[in-house]
Amino acid sequence: MTLITGNPTTPGASQTGQAPVPLWEQRAQSVVWVGGVPIGGHDVVIVAGPCAVESEEQLLQTAVAAKAAGADLLRGGAFKPRTSPYEFRGLGEAGLRLLAQAGKLTGLPVVTEVMSERQVELVAQYCDMLQIGSRNMSNFSLLEEVGRAGKPVLLKRGMSARIKEWLLAAEYVLAQGCDQLVLCERGIRTYDSEYTRNTLDLNAIAVLKRETHLPVLADPSHATGRSELVAQLGRAALAAGADGLMLEIHPSPSEALCDGRQSLSLGEFEQFMRDLGPLAEVCGRQLHRRAG
Ligand code: PEP
Ligand code: MN
């Protein structure tokens, strides 16, 4: 009987069962360019926006404020993975169109989640970076599809994933020839759920910066689940070596259709950004400032 090990059509797949040197550990630190913004270089990059795109007014107001406060990329979900099928699951393609409009208006590149293989082509038409959410980190056929899409990819950590499992998920994307991959630590499930939604794994950030060439972002919004904790944990992630942060912000968090409890108001975000510059400098970095 012949044992088939690995998919022969996958670059780097071994026919002998011996694992090749992983692509995540080859070569020097990568810089991933997203619409003119370098992630993984000297500059700290800030991604901000609502959890979900809810309306034209909500998104444009958020995008303009994000840009004014110094954000580098706009985030926002059009296809939302929700725990209950009866919760707001996003505006779909209409949401993608609004994201593209907001990106054009502000000049901010857009990152948004793609939840299934069938959506990759559609979502890629409207955004600058494809996000794989925590719940899909181990969806290997989706990982391969985004790896072939020709766009930068943001791979969030599965909520219960070990670092090695996360890296092997990254390998699925890299093995398709994609060299524009950024990791995002978004907190893992641990013991507590009363005081925080997840636990931000600062260890993982430090480990990934040592062991891989991939840029690493941190998402203190999903990691804490509480807006009043976001600034502290965001700063901690930068001190641990993160190349940037992804933050949820909303013009009226108490009215948000999704994750309002962890969203900074636009004013809180502005204050957060003002305070962040000096910390970035202490860490030997600086906040990215676009030319012009
Ligand atoms: C998100 O960033 O929109 C999101 C759903 O986060 P996560 O996949 O980390 O839960
Ligand atoms: Mn969210």
Image (cartoon, rainbow, N blue to C red):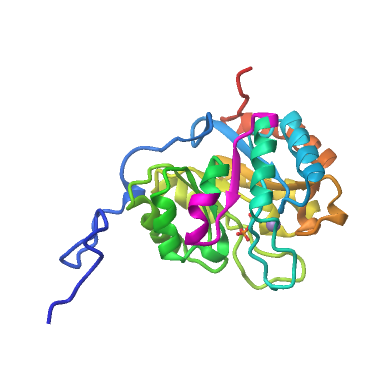
Q: Residue at x 17, y 64 (%)?
A: 15
Q: Position of residue 40 (x, y in %)?
A: 49, 37
Q: Residue at x 76, y 33 (%)?
A: 64
Ligand 1 is found in the corner quadrant, namely bottom right
Q: Position of residue 13 (x, y in %)?
A: 24, 59
The image shows residue 51, relative to residue 99, as above or below, that is: below
Verify whether residue 109 appears in magenta.
Answer: yes
Q: Position of residue 184 (x, y in %)?
A: 55, 51
Of residue 20 and residue 126, the one placed in the foreground of this image is: 126
Q: Could you tell me if residue 179 is visible in this image?
A: yes
In this view, the residue farthest toward the top is 292
In this view, the residue farthest toward the left is 1
- How many numbered discs? 0
Q: Residue at x 75, y 29 (%)?
A: 68
On the rendered structure, is 207 left or right of 266? left
Verify whether residue 151 appears in magenta.
Answer: no
Q: Residue at x 61, y 69 (%)?
A: 189
On the rendered structure, is 74 left or right of 267? left
| Quadrant in which residue 165 is drawn | bottom left
| Quadrant in which residue 273 is drawn | top right
Query: What segment carries the magenta color?
Result: 105-122
Q: Quadrant of the N terminus?
A: bottom left
On the rendered structure, is 74 left or right of 54? left
Q: Could you tell me if residue 235 is visible in this image?
A: no
Of residue 118 and residue 1, the one placed in the foreground of this image is: 118
Q: Quadrant of the C terminus?
A: top right
